[in-house]
Image (spheres, helix red, strand yellow):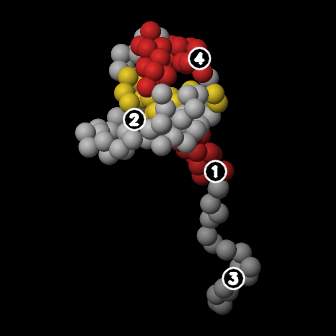
Amino acid sequence: MRRLRYSRVGKSSEGEINMSPLIDIIFILLIFFIVTTVFKHDPGVEVNIPSLNSAVPVEGERVILAVSENGEVYHGGRSIGVSGVYDVVRAFVREDKTAPVIVQSDVNARHGRVLEVVDQARLAGAKQVYSASKP
């Protein structure tokens, strides 16, 4: 008897990889990383911060306010004025009662304006108010 060999021409014996679950997992990871990302909140104005030797970094979520050279107060890229400080800080303190408030004041800003901003932040319930400086 003769044995016949049959070969499959053009057909692969390897299985195919189903990419659908892999793509689903990548999208779920992408959504997870987007949701858990902490975005940096810049005050929205460039200020010339003084340099101090005793500067200590502050970690974690915080409110950053900036007082420009001409006395304008900024938060998140928009001018809020001294009267807007209370509302901004109050909304933030409701979410996190221990979050600090950082006031970035220009070297040439009026001291009285900076104290008004600090006072409004404390009236809004901020327990920790810091002045920003360069190390």
Sequence-first disc among 2 and 1: 1
Q: Which residue is mark 1?
A: 23
Instruction: Classify the position of the N terminus by image quarter.
Output: bottom right
Give the SS element for disc 2. loop
The image shows residue 121 at horizontal and vertical percentages of: 45, 16
Mark 2 or 1, closer to the camera: 2
Label 1 environment density (alpha carbons within 10 Å; few <14, some 14–19, many ≥20): few
Between circles 3 and 1, the one closer to the viewer is 1
Label 4 neighbour load within 10 Å: few <14, some 14-19, many 20+: some
Q: Secondary structure at mark 3?
A: loop
Residue indicated by mark 3 = 7
Determine the CA span between mark 3 and mark 4: 81 Å
Q: At 71% across and 79% down in the image, what residue appears?
A: 8
Q: Which mark is residue 84?
A: 4
Residue sitting at the far left: 54
Q: Which residue is mark 2?
A: 132
Seen in the picture, residue 63 relative to 13 is either above or below; the reply is above
| Quadrant hosting residue 80 | top right
Residue 22 visible in image: yes
Quadrant hosting residue 123: top left
Q: Amino acid at mark 1?
A: Ile
Distance CA(mark 2)–CA(mark 1): 45 Å
Name the residue nearer the viewer: 108 or 128: 108
Corner quadrant of residue 87: top right
